[in-house]
Image: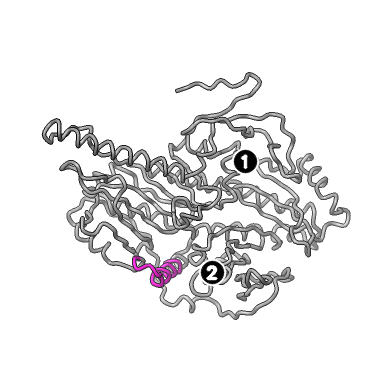
Amino acid sequence: MCECIPSLSMPIAGYWALRGGFTPRANPRYPNAHFPQQDMFRQPRSEFFVSFYHRSQESAKMFDAMKRRVELAYEQRRKSEANRLQKATNGNTMQYLERIPLSKNVTLTIEIPNAEHAGMIERMEAWCDEDSIPQIMQDTGVLIQFPDLAPDAKNGNDYVNRVGLVTLTGPLANVEQARIRIRNFTPVAISFPLKTLKPNILMKDVKSVIDKAIAEKLINFPNLEIMVQSSQLSKDPVPSCVVRGVPSHEGDICNACTALHRLLLDTTNDNEHGSAKIFSTVMDIPAVQQLAVTGVPDGYLIRTISLETNAIIYFPTVADRHFGATVFYLYGSVHAIMKARKYIQGLLPVRLIFDVENNDLLSPVDASSRELFLRDTERDLSVMVRKSRLEGEQLMTNDTLRNIVTIESEEHNLTNVYAMRHQLLRNSALENEPLVTTKDFDFFKNDFKARIAENNKIIAENSNDSLAKASSLLYSQLNRNKQSSSLPAVPVLSPPTINDIASLLPPMHICQEILQPLANENAPIALAVGGSAASKYTFGILVI
């Protein structure tokens, strides 16, 4: 390995990761002052640290392209050597002509808003001294890859390169550990408008008041970022106070919002500071995933989340998705919107991908039908089996079929996704791999899981893709070999079936009105954003 000796005047604190290169990085153990926002309350920093990190590491697209080149070069070498040996040894082959060995690692894809990628990579936030993407990779041995910063218009349907998709590659148990740490490391911002300030506080003095409270330890949350942002709407010039943190400090986020509300705003009752329904946050949900999050028809999943959390949720209508509307707005008390955010996160899609020898499948795939799409309604997931890129050309008699298996579901259903991997593979292929379970979505009730499963069934049945039809082939294949297999029983988290979703929800009516600040927010409501790109946004309000 080559050695890089930097200038003696340059302090170094870095690490190697895949490819080398110098780039300035903020020291994670000191408050950041590298390209700060003007209104951030941070102490000035005088040191710059350097880490061995290259910009191209961020792109899963580049990594996938390089991987394909290596595979193609290896396969070309196999063919060339086979032709040479056939001429030199009358067809005898040698051991080094074997194909690329299959890895026991798996790849898990999860959704993280693209706007948060840079902050997670650059380690410039107040909480980055506790954890970071490089630290997660080092501790778990999992490769974490981020997509391109901008989508590729020529390959818009390319799943690997889609903006917002983060891939985790490594042993299954380690991948799950990395996923949990990444979720706890994904930033969340809570804001509230600075209206009804106390009589002794002027708008221009808000920053100094907060600064003084921080200096006197009245507001003491070192792992959070507190800032005052000017309004982006000319019609509503009232600035907002923003609290940014990570889910691992959820308690601090809630306490900081309450403390700031008590410090700045005037209320008739002190109890209103903790339960005030003026807080808000946003979530960026790609248009292709919004039906799975809102529910078909009438957004009944969002309505259920609103009922469970007492949060008010604004979401784009079907018409606005054609104009690229992707933002969900959550309003209510800080505890309500944090809980609603968890619910929506549990509805985001995940994919578990792995390569496997055909003989290692409990039910090997027939060579005449290499592409299979199987819908498991019991576990609410889909299984896709295709020819693996690593299969190559059959040059030797022991070159058997190779498959790439993709198991797709929602994040709350990861326990069943991991269980399905065990159900598909033989014990010899698993090599004592532990059965991994998830617990971060245990608050999902069985009836809510049943509504999710029903929604996914409706989406699959109405899909234009002929492959997205439910199939009983999975059960027939597994049951055929179940008696002869020594595979241990796999727990199935199967919620009860609900046939009539509408009958379980409160009655509603739909009206149209211009969005205005809500004077009475005692009842939770879900709102569907309507309108067009050429007109003002209106909201279809679903009153509960």
**Is 418 covered by the magenta stretch?**
no
Question: Which residue is situated farthest in the right direction here?
Answer: 200
Residue 335, above or below 499: above
In the structure shown, which secondary structural element does the residue marked by tag 2 occupy?
helix
Q: Front-most of 415 and 327?
A: 327
Q: Main secondary structure of the magenta part?
A: helix
Q: Which disc is residue 433 wearing?
A: none
Q: Is residue 455 magenta?
A: yes
Indicate the position of residue 335 as horizontal and vertical percent values. 63, 57
Q: Residue 198, percent across and down?
A: 84, 56
**Circle 2 residue:** 304
Q: Quadrant of residue 463?
A: bottom left
- Mark 2, Cα crowd under 10 Å, few <14 / some 14-19 / many 20+, is many
The residue under the point 73% across, 40% down is 42
Marks 2/1: CA–CA distance? 33 Å
Whether the residues at callouts 2 and 1 have beta carbons within 8 Å, the answer is no
In the image, residue 190 above or below residue 75 = below
State the residue at coordinates (60%, 75%). Answer: 542
Task: Name the amino acid type tagged 1.
Answer: Trp
- For marks 2 and 1, the one nearer the N-term is 1
* The label number, if any, that marks residue 127 in the structure image: 1
- Splitting the image into 4 quarters, where does residue 282 fall? bottom right
Q: At which x and y percent is residue 246?
A: 60, 47
Residue with the most extreme top position: 8
- Which of these two is toward me, 333 or 509? 509
Name the quadrant of the C terminus: bottom right
* 82 relative position to 102: left or right: left
- Secondary structure at numbered mark 1: loop
As rendered, which of 114 and 280 lies closer to the eye? Answer: 114
Bounds of the magenta segment: 451-467
